[in-house]
Structures are given as structure tokens and as C-alpha cells.
Image: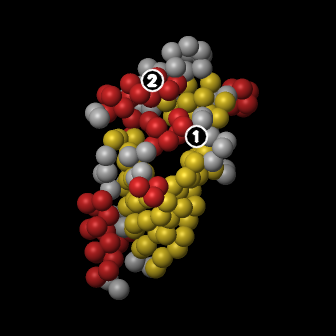
Amino acid sequence: MTIAHGLIMVAALVGAAGAATVAASAAPSAATIKQAEPLSNEDLYRLYSQRSWIWKDGAGYFAVPQRRFSAWTGKGRNASYGVGSWFITDAGRLCFKADWYAKTGAAPALTCFSHRRKGNVIFQKREPKGDWYVFANAPVRKDDEITKLRRGDYVVAKLGKVEDRLALKR
């Protein structure tokens, strides 16, 4: 599936009716978030399964078999990788729990993001103390965070290199 096809699927998820689109940089009001509904488990599964979330300095992949999560981040001496699982809770929340490995050792981490929808906008927030922001408009805008979700595994090749590099330093 191409990015365009993925974005069409997203547009279907957020729907065509409802509030006007919101600028990606505009923070939603507390009243907007209070009125917004959590995304369903099915919607979250369709958004993330078999996709890589491309970050500024890394990526995370949400595989379907065993709900495996794998990721890498950083460069050179600051490189690290994580391997674990991802899951969805009943309140529109997607989480990934992984053991992260770096040159200094290993540590477990749990990261969660909440998702809500109001009209044709999906909002996202990193839990527990993040701020709500626009995740996706319909139609999707080029600066929406959802454009960083790409079909396929963009993690495995780089993760192996980071893993090998860290193994050599032990």
C-alpha cells in the first residue's frame, strides 16, 4: 500500500463530516478534547499495524505477529534499539513496551499515546504528561503527524546495524 492509499484509509477513519480542519501547530482547547471521543481499538489497529512510525532520529515498527514492536533511535554513540510488544487499551490508547539497549546497558520502557476524534480531526497525546496535538486532519495535510506512519518495516535493516554496533562495544 502506498502512502497515498494509507492516507485515504485514514481519511475514511476520521470521516468527512464534523468540525473544520485544524492547523497542525494549533493546540486543541480543553473543551475540544473533552468533547472528542477515544478512537476504537479497531481504528487504532488499522492505523498502526504493519506500519513504521518514522521519527526525527529513528523509527518504530508495529508488526502483527505476536504484536511485536521494534525500534531504533539515535546515531553513533547515542544509538539505541528497542524490542518488545505493542498493545491497545479500551480508552483509545496505543502503547509499546520494549527493552531498550544502548552502550550503557539495557532498560525496560513503556510508552503510550492517547488518540481522540472530534469531527474530522484525530488528536494525539503522549501519556501521561504530553500535550494534545493534531495527529490527522481529513483531508490529511502534509504536516500532520500521521504522514509519518508508513506501510512496511522501515526498522529491521537499521536495527540490525545498531544491534551489531552495540554488541561490538561490549
Q: Position of residue 54 (x, y in %)?
A: 37, 47
117 displayed left or right of 106: right
Q: Quadrant of the N terminus?
A: top left
Say whether residue 122 is visible: yes
Q: Which residue position is annotated with label 2?
A: 11
Mark 1 Cα shell of 10 Å, populated few (<14), some (14-19), many (≥20): some
Q: Position of residue 92 (x, y in %)?
A: 62, 40
Front-most of residues 31 and 12? 12
Determine the residue positioned at 45% across, 23% down. Answer: 11
The amino acid marked with disc number 2 is Ala
Determine the residue positioned at 45% across, 79% down. Answer: 104
Q: Quadrant of the C terminus?
A: bottom left
Would you place residue 39 above or below residue 49 in this image? above
Determine the residue positioned at 52% across, 73% down. Answer: 107
Q: Which residue position is annotated with label 1?
A: 41
Would you place residue 39 above or below residue 19 in this image? below
Q: Position of residue 58 (x, y in %)?
A: 37, 55
Say whether residue 126 is visible: no
Tell me the colour scheme of the image. Answer: secondary structure
For the residues bearing labels 2 and 1, Cβ distance under 8 angstroms: no
Q: Position of residue 144 (x, y in %)?
A: 45, 32
Local SS, label 1:
helix
The amino acid marked with disc number 1 is Asn
